[in-house]
Amino acid sequence: MSTTVTIGLDVGDRFIELCSLGSSGEVLERGQLPTRLAALEQRFRGCPPARVVLETGKHSPWISRAVEAFGHEVVVANARRLQLIARDSRKCDRSDAEALARLGRLDPRLLKPIKHRSPAIQSDLALLRGREALVRSRTLQINHLRGVIASSGGQIPKCSAESFHRRAAAAIPEDLKGALAPLLAMVQSLTVQIRAMHTQVEAVSKERYPETELLRQVPGVGPLTALAYVLVLEDPRRFPTSRSVGAYLGLVPRRRASGDSDPQLRITKTGDRMLRCLLVQSAHYILGPFAPPSSLRSYGERISARGGPNAKKRAVVAVARKLSSLLYALWVTGSVYEPVRTR
């Protein structure tokens, strides 16, 4: 699409700051729009094609789809790349919109543009993220109950989160029952809702994403991890190699090499946090006492055997990174999983 005008949008909850630049970089227009679909349609529908640049954020998915539907080229800039804006000592929405327009006019590749997922994928991801929010809420309540009961001299026996509301009821002292009974009832209610959402995840996987069965061949990869992997990656063909997936999910070390200095740093932790945590949980199982022998397990054990500080943590992260590549290969090739590679 050939464009001569570049428009920067700094999006807020209530208003969008707009700055339009001409082909030689001169400011053609400054303005403010309400963060509403009707306002965007009035401004962009029927206008000559332009390059529209905005940052990633909670409003960027629907705004980018709407502006693109009105016939414009949309560049959604990765916010991690915009330190020029974030660290500006004179930062304001007006100057941010102009900075976005100038960066987009110079070379959009500097912004590491991203492509938002389809509405259907986002809807299914909302199911997984909703379940994750319920699990976090239950964990918070359980930790609070354990702390309060322990401070009064009581003790709740070790148990799973699913059975906590049954095991904890008998351990609550009489003088605390009035204060803690509502929290215990909330834990029970959250457990029921989490179980129902887990059933829904199973149904969605079978009906819409049969490829998750390929990923669940690996012991330790359950329905949550398999569905999250498919939804977050969406299209495996956009990754040139299987190793690119580990970098995309933030499972590779940072680099700050300069001259002869190339220190060993922590992983980047970019990408989707939920999927990264699920892969790490699967890696813990693979290296745990109940997992069957496999090449992945042997790989992690070799790294752990090197010793040194945090050897086990490094092994878990390495297995999670290797697992992300393995799941990619199973998905793309549709092959049968071989726990121990003979070649």
Image (tube, rainbow, N blue to C red):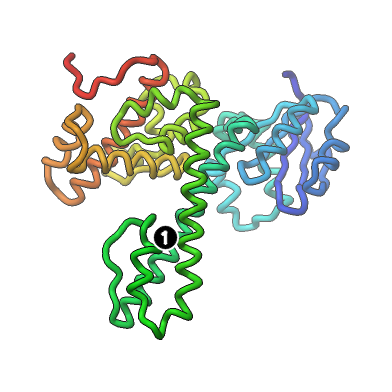
In this rendering, does residue 261 appear at all?
no
Q: Which residue is mark 1?
A: 139
Q: Position of residue 156 (x, y in %)?
A: 30, 69
In this rendering, does residue 184 appear at all?
yes
- Horizontal placement of 203 versus 164: left or right? right
On screen, 239 above or below 297? Answer: above
- 216 or 165, nearer to the observer: 165
On screen, 178 above or below 139? Answer: below
Q: Position of residue 308 (x, y in %)?
A: 14, 48
Q: Quadrant of the C terminus?
A: top left
The residue at the far bottom in this view is 175
- Horizontal placement of 43 versus 287: left or right? right
Residue under the image location 72 percent in, 18 percent down? 1
- Horizontal placement of 234 versus 139: left or right? right
- Residue 122 lies in what quarter of the image? top right
- Horizontal placement of 106 versus 336: left or right? right
Mark 1 lies on a secondary structure that is helix
Residue under the image location 36 percent in, 20 percent down? 329
- Which amino acid is tagged 1? Thr
On screen, 214 above or below 19? Answer: above
Dot 1 alpha-carbon crowd within 10 angstroms: few under 14, some 14 to 19, many 20 or more: some
- 226 or 236, nearer to the observer: 226
Q: Position of residue 198 (x, y in %)?
A: 47, 43
Residue under the image location 48 percent in, 23 percent down? 210
Looking at the rendered structure, the number of numbered marks drawn on it comes to 1
- Residue 118 lies in what quarter of the image? top right
Q: Position of residue 56 (x, y in %)?
A: 61, 41
- 260 or 65, nearer to the observer: 65
